[in-house]
Image (spheres, helix red, strand yellow):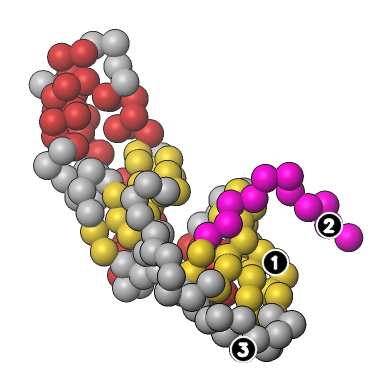
């Protein structure tokens, strides 16, 4: 028997929590799909036997996907922030999300096809805009404000001036 996490992120999906969980498990390290639970009876947005909840982990974070129907939509008020080490990792995650029915947004944000927001954030970006050199930090920040997917070389060039 596995230990139940004290705190778990519950994500509401219209009807494809299992598909989302499997995508995350295939895309991100330290991610997996656990138990898939079926509804014991009919409910407002589903029938007995439909997938009701899916236990999964995204980069070590325990989550539950709930197929709750169309009543609630995701917003940028919640996002997964993924710290990337280099441009290759940044590109890999960004492209996986966007090319699988997702959409680009600004400043390193994108949204997957289920409506979950992701911040694909290179460590170099965070280091640049949190630098004690506030003039250089502002140059890096201003460069970021013009981007969708973060270009690490451009951020580093802006930081250097």
Residue 130's quadrant in the figure?
Answer: top left
Q: Is 51 colored magenta in this rendering?
A: no
| Cα–Cα gap, marks 1 and 3 | 22 Å
Q: Residues within 10 Å of mark 1 (few under 14, many from 20)?
A: some
Q: Which mark is residue 34?
A: 1
Q: Are marks 2 and 1 in contact (CB under 8 Å)?
A: yes
Quarter of the rendering occupied by the N terminus: bottom right
116 left or right of 51 in image = left
Q: Secondary structure at mark 1?
A: strand
Q: Position of residue 157 (x, y in %)?
A: 15, 29
Q: Secondary structure at mark 3?
A: loop
Q: Earlier in the sequence, mark 2 or mark 1?
A: 2
| Cα–Cα gap, marks 2 and 1 | 10 Å
Residue drawn at (21%, 13%) of the image: 134
Q: Is residue 9 above or below residue 156?
A: below
Give 62 or 89, whichever is nearer the viewer: 62
Which residue carries the number 2 mark?
A: 2
């Amino acid at each position: 028997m596995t230990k139940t996490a004290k705190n778990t992120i519950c994500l509401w999906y219209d009807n494809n929590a299992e598909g989302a969980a499997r995508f995350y498990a295939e895309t991100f390290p330290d991610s997996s799909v656990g138990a898939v639970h079926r509804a014991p009876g009919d409910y407002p947005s589903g029938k007995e036997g439909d997938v009701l909840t899916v236990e999964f982990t995204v980069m070590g974070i325990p989550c539950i996907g709930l197929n709750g129907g169309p009543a609630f939509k995701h917003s940028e008020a919640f996002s997964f922030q993924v710290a990337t080490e280099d441009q290759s990792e940044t590109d890999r995650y960004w492209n996986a999300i966007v090319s699988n029915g997702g959409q680009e947004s600004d400043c390193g944000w994108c949204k997957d096809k289920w409506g979950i927001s992701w911040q694909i954030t290179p460590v170099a970006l965070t280091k640049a805009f949190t630098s004690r050199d506030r003039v250089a930090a502002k140059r890096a920040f201003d460069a970021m404000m013009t981007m969708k997917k973060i270009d690490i070389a451009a951020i580093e060039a802006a930081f250097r001036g």
